[in-house]
Amino acid sequence: MFLKENPVRTWSARPALLTALCAVLLTGTAACGGEPASEPGDKTVVLYSGRNEALVKPLFEMFTKKTGIKIEARYGSTAQMAAQLAEEGEKSPAEAFLSQDAGGLGAVNKKGLLAAVPAELTAKVPATYRAKDGNWVGVTARSRVLVYNPTMAEKEELPPSVFDLTDPKWKGKVAIAPTNGSFQAFVTAVRVQHGEDKAKEFFTALKANDAQIRENNIAIVEEVEAGKVPVGLVNHYYLGEVAKERGTTPDKLNAKLHFFAAGDSGAMVNVSGIGVLRRSATDPDVRALLDYLLSTEAQTWFAQTTYEYPLVSGAPAPAYVPPLAELKVPDIDLNDLETLEASIALIKSAGLTP
């Protein structure tokens, strides 16, 4: 299993190396699978983070400054952290799990490791973006989009459905990042919405249509921006990241965003979210972290810094995208996105990865 985001967000990992790499990848005082490194009320939260350190550490520092509670974070890909939690089980030192996507949370929840998030917190987030059983809650949302260069693909000719990208007119013109976590979550969504056979047919056809394989989403946006490829499948916030790297705003870039038609798999919205390990269900420090992540301050920080959609009302969305409530998402239950390994196998069988 492997996930690869852009260099800012996360890095690749393979489960076969998980145990060997554990001591290196998971920093902190507790050994892998060891005794809890934190006790209730000790002003420390042991957090397994599927979100990259460079991305979220500044927010954790803001939390510590505000509350005096330290975050002892161990970083890796979401798939890696979920696998680590499954391996450690009830002996895990983790008190909370911050996941890049709903699939990772669903996988850990399926193992019976998560406790219910307090109802007053889950109530802050729309039902679509939290667990049905209340055992995890979304923190931010991100939409799948087609990034395009208007000089190479006019807005009027952009497809209403992601499935249209297998048409010969798009041969060699579509960039994808199949080792990327967000692409793999998209594959899972197609499988859940349309079944295994149609999903395999689509991704095999995408490969046959000479889809342009790239390492990550940032590379796709940069190539679309430079006119090297007409369109690419990414998450919406990467346009903001590229603009930020260039010292400008998204509206000043050549690249633009195209949202697929209502209900299309290409219009899926996924979440980053958090779950609490059962042994820490009543820990006041963990509760304080959840309170903070769902506060207007943190939600606004995400919108302005990572360009993701906030999920709590009162925090403004990024200016260059439609409001989250206006997105016509497909009928996909995010709780069903935990079958990541099957999606990675499908990607490989379709020829999109070695």
Image (cartoon, rainbow, N blue to C red):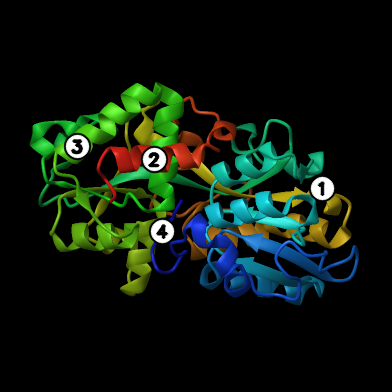
In the rendered structure, which disc, 4 or 1, sits on the residue that comes first in sequence? Answer: 4
Three-letter residue code for mark 2: Ala
How far apart are the two marked residues, 2 and 4, measured between alpha carbons? Answer: 15 Å
Residue beneath disc 2: 345
Look at discs 1 and 3 and give the one toward the viewer: 1
SS at mark 1 in the image:
helix
Disc 4: CA contacts within 10 A as few (<14), some (14-19) or many (>=20)? many
Q: Residues within 10 Å of mark 1 (few under 14, many from 20)?
A: some
**Cβ–Cβ under 8 Å for marks 1 and 3:** no
Q: Name the mark nearer the viewer: 2 or 4.
A: 2
Label 4 to label 1: alpha-carbon separation: 29 Å
Q: Secondary structure at mark 3?
A: loop
Give the mark, 4 or 3, whose residue is nearer the N terminus: 4
Q: Position of residue 350 (x, y in %)?
A: 27, 38
Q: Secondary structure at mark 2?
A: helix
Disc ID at residue 278: 1
Give above or below for 324 relative to 328. below
Residue 274 placement, left or right of 186:
right
Report x, y in % for residue 116. Answer: 79, 41
Q: Sequence-wise, which precedes: disc 3 or disc 2? A: 3
Image quadrant assignment for residue 250: bottom left
- Marking on residue 172: none
* Image quadrant where residue 41 sits: bottom right
Q: Amino acid at mark 3?
A: Leu
Near mark 2 (Cα within 10 A), the count class, few <14, some 14-19 or many ≥20, is few
Residue 158: mark in rendering: 3
Dot in front, 3 or 2: 2
**Residue that appears at 74% across and 74% down:** 64
Q: CA distance from mark 1 to mark 2?
A: 31 Å
Q: Name the residue carrying label 4.
A: 4
Q: Earlier in the sequence, mark 1 or mark 2?
A: 1
Q: Nearer the viewer, residue 220 or 295?
A: 220
